[in-house]
Image: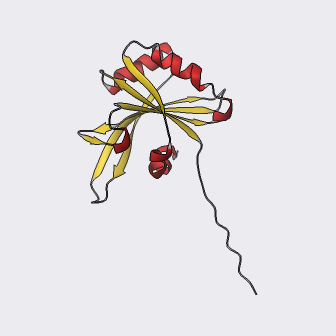
Amino acid sequence: MSKHRLIVEEDYDFLCYGLSCHIKDYRVAWHLNQSLKFNCKRSQLEIHDRSGEAFEYATFVHRDPKSHLRFILINNFSGNQPLIKAYKQFNMLMVVEGYIDIFDGERFMANLQSIESIQLVTELPSSPLEKIQFSLFEE
């Protein structure tokens, strides 16, 4: 009798944007609330490094029930420790998760760039975030 194995690969589709700005994370969230009509709620993302030390990164989450999208603004630094070392030149990361097939990324980037406190917005490959995606997207 042969055995069959079911291998389930949970994977999330998401977009990632790098933001460079000179203001605190809560002020960026406030600007998103004002400019894009978001309703960002603050939470924490706790990540453990290889030695077991825990680092907490501030996150601000906005859910859009109409478009079935979730926007997550992440402070890329906990003290001097970057969340994603490959993106240490960015203060914040903006992750868009959900039905991204119908999401207008160009328009979203233009809206982010129109916020005067944000100096640079760049679309980034999401592959460096894949190792923390389960922590990031858990409800």
Measured as percent of width and height from the top left, residue 136 is found at 47, 44
Residue 84 visible, this orientation: no
Please say if 44 is above or below 50.
above
Residue nearest the viewer, comparing 115 with 60: 115
Residue at the bottom extreme, as displayed: 1
Q: Residue at x 50, y 50 (%)?
A: 134
Please state if 116 lies on the left or on the right of 62 as rendered: left
Q: Quadrant of the N terminus?
A: bottom right
| 136 lies above or below 60 | below
The residue at the point 63 percent across, 61 percent down is 8
In the picture, residue 98 is in which quadrant? top right
Vertical order, 22 against 82 (above or below)? above
Depth order, front residue of 15/56? 15
Q: At which x and y percent is residue 34?
A: 46, 14
Q: Residue at x 67, y 34 (%)?
A: 101
| Quadrant housing residue 30 | top left
Confirm whether residue 120 shows in the render: yes
Residue beneath the point at 29% across and 51% down: 54
Is 138 above or below relative to 61?
below
In this rendered view, identify the residue nearer to me: 111 or 124: 124
